[in-house]
């Protein structure tokens, strides 16, 4: 089954950093637009919010305002892996983080969801 495997989550203090990784299994990332999504506590999968994206159409990087200047998305297609460097973490960053892949641009439909990785930020 083609999906992502997310890793790198854990417990961090407010102001700390984490690096999340997302490795594709069963497909090749270089042909896809990749997004990172945040599922806040007490929200179901429908509540996943796209927070960052790296376009396969033109390489543009997108960030929502709440993570801009704190998070950095990158990809290593040779390793079939996408990263999210998270700095200056805040308690509201707590939640489960997922990767998704789209054959369109960052406003397209995403799939290939993995199990996610839990991030908990303490104040």
Image (spheres, grey):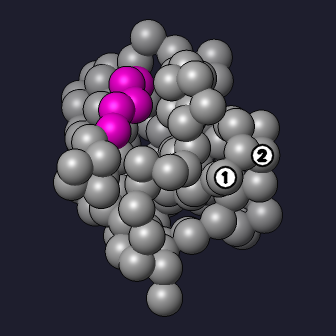
Residue that mark 1 sits on: 103
Q: Mark 2 packing: few (<14 Cα in 10 Å), some, or many (20+)?
A: few
* In this picture, residue 54 sits left or right of residue 17: right
Asked if 110 appears above or below 17 in the picture, the reply is below
Contact between marks 1 and 2 (CB within 8 A): the answer is yes
In this rendering, the label closer to the viewer, 1 or 2: 1
Residue 108: image tag = 2
Query: Which numbered disc, 1 or 2, marks the residue that appears first in the sequence?
Result: 1
For the record, the magenta segment spans 71-75
Q: CA distance from mark 1 to mark 2?
A: 8 Å
Residue 37: image tag = none
Q: Position of residue 32 (x, y in %)?
A: 54, 50
Answer yes or no: is residue 52 visible.
no
Q: Mark 1 packing: few (<14 Cα in 10 Å), some, or many (20+)?
A: some
- Residue occupying the point 43% across, 70% down: 27
Q: Position of residue 111 (x, y in %)?
A: 65, 65
Principal SS element in the magenta part?
A: strand
- Disc 2 element: loop
- Residue occupying the point 78% across, 64% down: 46
What is the quadrant of residue 50 in the picture? top right
* In this picture, residue 66 sits left or right of residue 49: left
Answer yes or no: is residue 3 visible.
yes
Asked if 118 appears above or below 83 in the picture, the reply is below
Q: Which quadrant of the figure contains the C terminus?
A: top left
- Disc 1 element: loop
Q: Nearer the viewer, residue 22 or 91?
A: 22
């Amino acid at each position: 089954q083609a999906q992502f495997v997310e890793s790198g989550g854990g417990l961090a203090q407010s102001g700390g950093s984490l690096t999340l990784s997302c490795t594709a299994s069963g497909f090749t990332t270089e042909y896809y637009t990749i997004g990172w999504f945040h599922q806040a506590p007490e929200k179901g999968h429908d509540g996943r919010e796209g927070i960052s994206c790296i376009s396969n159409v033109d390489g543009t990087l997108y960030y929502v305002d709440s993570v801009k200047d704190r998070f950095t998305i990158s990809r290593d297609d040779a390793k079939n892996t996408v990263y999210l460097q998270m700095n200056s973490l805040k308690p509201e960053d707590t939640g489960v983080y997922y990767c998704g892949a789209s054959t369109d641009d960052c406003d397209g439909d995403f799939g290939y969801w993995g199990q996610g990785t839990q991030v908990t930020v303490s104040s």
